[in-house]
Amino acid sequence: MVTGASRGIGAAIAAALRTAGARVVRAARSLADGREDGYHDLRCDVSDAAAVDGFARRVRDEYGVPEVVVSNAGAFVLKPIEQTTTAELEGQIAANLRGPFYVARAFLPGMRDAGRGAFITVGSVADHVAFPENAAYAATKFGLRGLHETLVAEYRGSGVRLTLVSPGPTDTSVWDPVNPDAREGFIHRAGMLRPADVAEAVLFAASRPPHVHLDWLRINPLT
């Protein structure tokens, strides 16, 4: 199961898992319920707790407890703090912190009861490195890393393997309004990671043997 799977990194992760032989449920606000190309798509806004709980019930009712959950959905804003509105801050908290919390709460207890599974959270280089104009985004991503580390402690010994994948700048549509190629201090898009690079890292974490716990995986562009 992959959240935020309609485009970018999430779509690449879903494709990598599907190619590896998994049955993949894709979740996103922009997806319509249906089945296509071997995927089962379900519309879900992860910032809505009731929607996540209902979505999780539908997944469990049809497939049982997932072997792999990838909590990927998120949002990005790049602004100095004095230009960041309250609505933008709340949007970052909803997408990047509350949403992953709701997904973890909905799926992890069942995985613990089953004594197995991989729960993989997609973070960011901004979950451990500070950059200018990242106040709202980094605050939520640092919080996401705190959530991950707490869940690792809570689920230790349960058989559930929790991994945080923290990619550096990745060339997706989130950069379209920013135009990093024209801004000093920003890596050009041609030098960024590709969504497939992040997907490969997630697939690597998901496919480790059950006795191997990969806690944190950081990947960055070479430049």
Image (cartoon, rainbow, N blue to C red):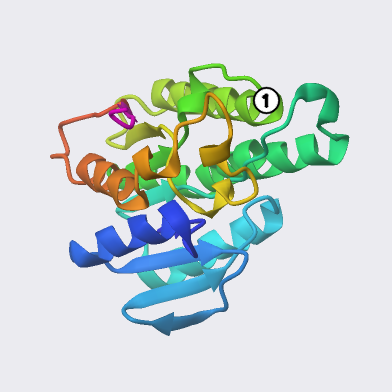
Neighbour tally class for label 1: few under 14, some 14-19, many 20 plus, Cα within 10 Å: some
Q: Is residue 210 magenta?
A: no
Relative to 158, say whether 57 is above or below. Answer: below
**Element carrying mark 1:** loop
Q: Nearer the viewer, residue 214 or 189?
A: 189
Q: Quick check: can you spot residue 117?
A: no
Above-or-below relation of 7 to 157? below
The percent coordinates of residue 31 (x first, y second) are 56, 72
The number of numbered discs placed on residues in the rendered structure image is 1
| Residue at the image point whose x is 65% and y is 26% from the top | 134
What residue is disc 1 on?
133
Q: Amino acid at mark 1?
A: Glu
Question: Magenta segment, which residues?
Answer: 217-223
**What residue is drawn where x is 70% and y is 54%?**
48
* Residue drawn where x is 53% and y is 27% of the image: 147
Which is nearer the eye, 92 or 145?
A: 92
Q: Quadrant of the N terminus?
A: bottom left
Locate residue 56, reporting x and y percent: 52, 60
| 151 relative position to 64: left or right | right
Q: Nearer the viewer, residue 178 or 174?
A: 178
